[in-house]
Amino acid sequence: MKIAIIGTAFPMRGAMAQLNGILANYLSKENEVEIFSFKRQYPKLLFPGKTQEDTSNVDIIDPKIRNTQIIDSIDPLNWRKSAKLIAKSNPDLLILRFWIPFFAPAFYSICKYVKKKTGAKVMFICDNVIPHEHRIGDETLIKLIFKVGDYFMIHSKSVENDLLKFSKGKPFMLSPHPVYNIFGPATGKTESREVIKEKFGIDLGNEKVILFFGYIRRYKGLPYLINAMKEINAKMKVKLMIVGEFYEDEKPTHDLIDSLGLKNDIFVISDYIPNEEVKYFFCASDVLVLPYIDATQSGIIQIAYYYDKPVIATNVGGLGEVVIDGKTGFVVEPRSSKSIADAIIEYYDKDLEKEFSANVAEEKKKYSWEEFITNIMKLVDASKN
């Protein structure tokens, strides 16, 4: 089958670019795959980060896969040019990730043209249907883009419920978010902490260490975790690493840490972490904590699971579908610093890291890329019949 993956990919940075790269690699084992990516993903005015380009040293995409940077998300004249180029490759299937409505006009225009010229089918892999941060016009754009969809892959029941509000009668399949396997093999906890000390000047020693990882926005609920640290450290000494670029003003976070007297217990690395350094933060930590107040699913959990790391997450969206309470971590109430603190204290009081890590090692087997690719093909084949 000839497959065109349309959307962000290296050298653009971020989870969606990484996932498209991994997807292309696995699909290319039995299909002819080409990527058509952005030359401009967001206008600078709308991008809250420092740079849109990946600073990693290694391109995760197999060099045999053609990756053409052509799409300009905000230039309608470019959409026709991009669509013509994609149509020339005569694909059987277009695969696009959908997570925010911003790209809907470009994707709709491109897909409509390519479908008309080639008869290609369109599959959306929906990381979200309704975005975490709502904007006027979102629903109109979602309805527009889903008109050109033929199949939908989703990762959680939460997203399934949202999908059915906008697309009824079209084939879909729920297949869990696969693990991230691009950041290299695990390193020992001691070695990882030494690397962090050398590269970032953070001395974790033999302390208990919890991790918050990923870019920071309001819906991630970080203040609830920071407030929980006050209660935790009244009972035991625990360090928190906050690792990720702020997509909002970071001053209130530092002010909160200072006001609680936690400056020596919370380390903040407010930057995008290159692929080759990601593993050290997970391998140096005892547990990942996600205090989200809104979610669909989380790719961060799938990084933790790859490294057999337990997770404490709030019960929002599909997080509770992946974190098995009392087995691979804890699922706690959202917007509750006390619930987060109680779970972390229990985790250490009962010395659960070894037991939970072994459970994660077994549980993560269901999140393989091979299984995800098989499900994509099952969905396409079933719809043909």
Image: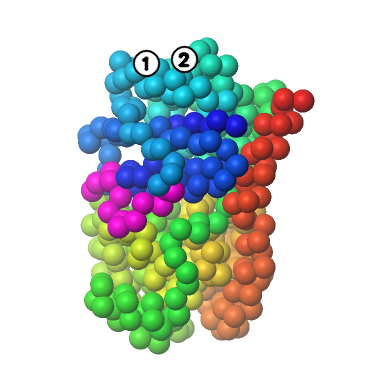
Task: Give the magenta part as a residue range.
Answer: 50-62
Quadrant of the image containing the C terminus: top right
Q: Secondary structure at mark 2?
A: helix
Residue 132 bears which disc, if any? none
- Seen in the picture, residue 307 relative to 248 is either above or below; the reply is below
Amino acid carrying label 2: it is: Tyr
Q: Furthest residue to the bottom?
A: 206
- Seen in the picture, residue 8 relative to 248 is either above or below; the reply is above
Q: Is residue 236 visible?
A: yes
Q: Is residue 133 visible?
A: no
- Seen in the picture, residue 101 relative to 346 is either above or below; the reply is above
Of the pair 225 and 50, the residue shown nearer to us = 50
Of the pair 317 and 244, the residue shown nearer to us = 244
Residue wearing tag 2: 113
Q: Contact (CB < 8 A) between labels 1 and 2? A: yes
Residue wearing tag 1: 80
Q: Position of residue 11 (x, y in %)?
A: 32, 45
Quadrant of the image containing the N terminus: top right
